[in-house]
Amino acid sequence: MSLWGWILVACAVSIATKFLGFLVPARLLDNPRMLRVAGSLTIGLLAALTATNTVASGQSLVVDARVAALVAAAVALWLRAPFLVVVLVGALAAGLARLLGAA
Amino acid sequence: MLLLKSPAVRVGLSVAVATGLYGLSFGALSVAAGLDVLQTMALSLLLFSGGSQFAFIGVVAGGGSGISAMSAAALLGIRNGVYGMQLNVLLRPPRWRKLVMAHLTIDESAATASGQRDPDEQRRGFWAAGIGVFALWNLFTLLGAVVGNAMGDPARWGLDGAAVAAFLGLLWPRIRAREPAAIAVVCAVITLVAVPFVPSGVPILIAAVVAAVLGLSGFVPPSEGLEPDVEPYAPGAPRGGA
């Protein structure tokens, strides 16, 4: 299937997931296990995405300017910078690291 | 205006501005990942969930397949189903309104509503944040995508660094205790170990399975990880509604 196809499937799944929440019986909420899985999935996926976007390049691991972006973003977040500032700091750090000769 | 006197509406609108602005980065990163402007807008208009949208383009940018990208987005969107259940109990909407409410169900609208105590304020907070974020998120996605398109080579502008920062920024507010931090570290390490052995995108799905097992095992307290990207209520500030 083309990228367009998967985009539309992703959209349909998202809409269905949200709507399903409004349809299931309320007592499902009393099940702490469901909340735990939804929460830990969110954390695990975001951590995995952070890791691959920092050091994965196809199927190999490389240390390049993106590591500088990770460190700079962490400092910005620690200083409680808003999201957009954090993203700009990440871009700036990667750009600077490349100017200084990082791959 | 009477509506602007409502604390929930004011909170919802300020969250909408903050969240909308980071739609700029989504738009720019999406075209850098190889999607065109129309595909980028389809995600913001129809999928409409920041984390899942970033996940989709993050997998595509790393050379992952469409099905991996879709799966990562779908798994990350499961929490929206939980918000839907919570909002259904909280706001008790009439049946016909559920479809529209479901589409506007995201981290920010759920958090704005549940931060209020008065039922009318909860309702106003939901709609203000939901409609506000939807409008501004899409507006700024379009702007980011058009600007990103004009920028050319993503690496030259450090856009790959921006993607790293964006994912860390989404993860950060959800790490408030030792258990979620442990899950994040375990999943990151497993992902990297898997990278050389399986096709791009698949390591992320392996990490998802591990995270789900950790969640099922009762390792984390309930509702860890279900925090909004943009916290509507500053820590320690009054939660409004009387």
Image (cartoon, coloured by chain):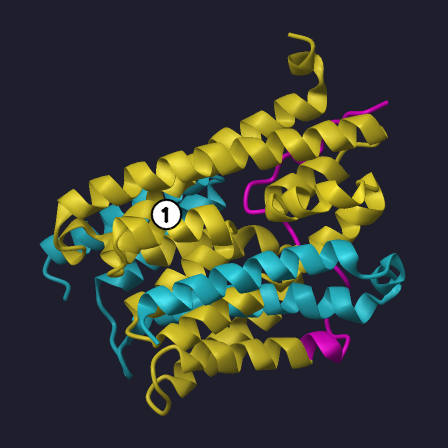
Chain colours: A cyan, B yellow
Q: Quadrant of the N terminus of chain A?
A: bottom left
Main SS, magenta region, reads loop
Chain to which mark 1 belongs? B
Quadrant placement of the C terminus of chain A: bottom left
How dense is the environment of label 1, judged by Cα within 10 Å: few (below 14), some, or many (20 and up)?
many
Relative image position of residue B115 (x, y in whole percent): 75, 36
Residue positioned 73% across, 57% down in the render: A21
In this view, the residue farthest toward the top is: B1
Q: Which of the 4 quarters of the picture holds residue B200?
A: bottom left
What is the magenta range?
A: B214-242
Percent coordinates x, y for residue A73 in the rendering: 38, 51
Determine whether the residue tagged by mark 1 lies in a helix, strand or loop: helix
Residue that mark 1 sits on: B41
Residue at image coords 60%, 43%:
B104
Which residue is at a point 41% across and 86% down the rendered structure image?
A: B193
Q: Amino acid at mark 1?
A: Met
Residue B57 found in image quarter: bottom left
Let me know if residue B219 is in the magenta part.
yes
Residue A12 painted magenta: no
